[in-house]
Image: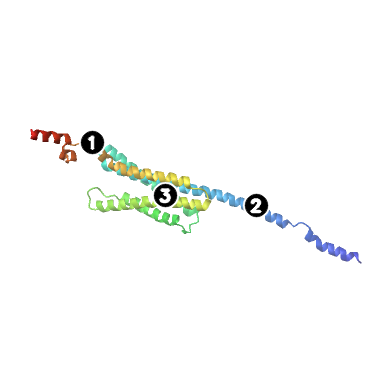
């Protein structure tokens, strides 16, 4: 009879001593979850990269190219070159709108659109203004009509706003990318800043290029402004005139 209590006690301890399959199953589940998270992060990182490239190609490249093309056409007298520059402007702006739309669709479809950061807020406003600008561009009245001046002013204001918000949104997008992935963005910020500086310099320089070329040429229809050289004779000539008067 003394053996029976010992047997019962051993039977009660067996479930506690025997290895439980639950920790092994839990470890396997955690490993599977980590693999899924890694796969999702790689997929999300790829989508973020594509979104950033589309935004740069639209706002950071095609839009400035279109603006520079139409700016250069203002002083162009050749009809053929003027037509080419206008088509470059139109096609660059259209492709910029299409690429920005693709980036917007990707953002709404794949990203968390809580609109709790500046990049998402500026992006929504930017996409709306881009389409409004495109619509106004297609409704361009003929030169010389009554509404041409109002149209030109609106087109210029919206274009300037799109350019400014586009550049700003690229910077905020790089910052959001850094916060999302903890990756360095110093190189990309430096390269984009250099690009913006070059575009601004070229924009200002081509506006003054014709004026710079005319500085060494005196046209027949232009009146020559008197300069210091014309108003005051050299000192040698003054001395000679004084000597002649004294004689």
Q: Is residue 207 visible in the rendered structure shown here?
A: yes
Work out whether mark 3 precedes mark 1 in sequence or the reverse, and give the earlier one.
Answer: 3
Decide: is 70 above or below 33: above
Question: Which disc number belongs to residue 216?
Answer: 1
Q: Give the residue at mark 3.
A: 100
Q: Is residue 220 left or right of residue 5?
A: left
Question: Viewer-proximal residue, 232 or 152?
Answer: 232
Q: Is label 3 in a helix, a strand or a loop?
A: helix
Give the distance between the C-alpha atoms of the residues marked 3 and 1, in whole angstroms: 45 Å
Q: Quadrant of the N terminus?
A: bottom right
| Percent of width and height locating residue 224 | 16, 39
Residue visible at 42% across and 45% down? 192
Q: Quadrant of the C terminus?
A: top left
Mark 2 is surrounded, within 10 Å at the Cα level, by few (under 14), some (14 to 19) or many (20 or more) other residues, namely: few
Badge 3: how crowded within 10 Å, few (<14), some, or many (20+)? many
Write the residue at 39% across / 54% down.
126
Please say whether residue 92 is visible from this viewpoint: no
Residue at far front of view? 246
Foreground disc of the pair 3, 1: 1
Tell me the residue that label 2 is attached to.
31
Residue 116 position in % (x across, y down):
47, 59
């Amino acid at each position: 009879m003394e053996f029976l209590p010992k047997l019962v006690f051993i039977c009660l301890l067996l479930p506690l001593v025997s290895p439980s399959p639950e920790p092994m199953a839990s470890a396997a589940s955690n490993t599977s979850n980590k693999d899924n998270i890694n796969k999702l992060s790689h997929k999300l990182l790829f989508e973020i990269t594509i979104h950033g490239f589309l935004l740069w190609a639209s706002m950071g490249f095609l839009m400035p190219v279109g603006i520079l093309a139409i700016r250069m056409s203002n002083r162009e007298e050749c009809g053929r070159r003027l037509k080419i520059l206008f088509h470059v402007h139109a096609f660059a702006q259209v492709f910029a709108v299409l690429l920005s739309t693709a980036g917007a669709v990707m953002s709404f479809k794949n990203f968390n659109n809580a609109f709790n950061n500046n990049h998402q807020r500026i992006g929504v406003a930017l996409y709306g203004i881009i389409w409004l600008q495109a619509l106004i561009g297609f409704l361009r009245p003929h030169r010389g009509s009554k509404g041409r001046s109002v149209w030109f002013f609106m087109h210029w204001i919206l274009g300037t706003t799109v350019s400014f918000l586009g550049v700003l949104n690229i910077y905020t997008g790089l910052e959001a990318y850094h916060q999302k992935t903890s990756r360095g963005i110093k190189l990309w910020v430096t390269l984009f800043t250099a690009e913006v500086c070059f575009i601004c310099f070229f924009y200002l320089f081509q506006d003054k290029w014709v004026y710079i070329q005319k500085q060494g040429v005196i046209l027949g229809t232009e009146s020559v402004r008197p300069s210091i050289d014309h108003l005051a004779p050299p000192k040698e000539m003054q001395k000679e005139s004084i000597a002649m008067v004294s004689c």
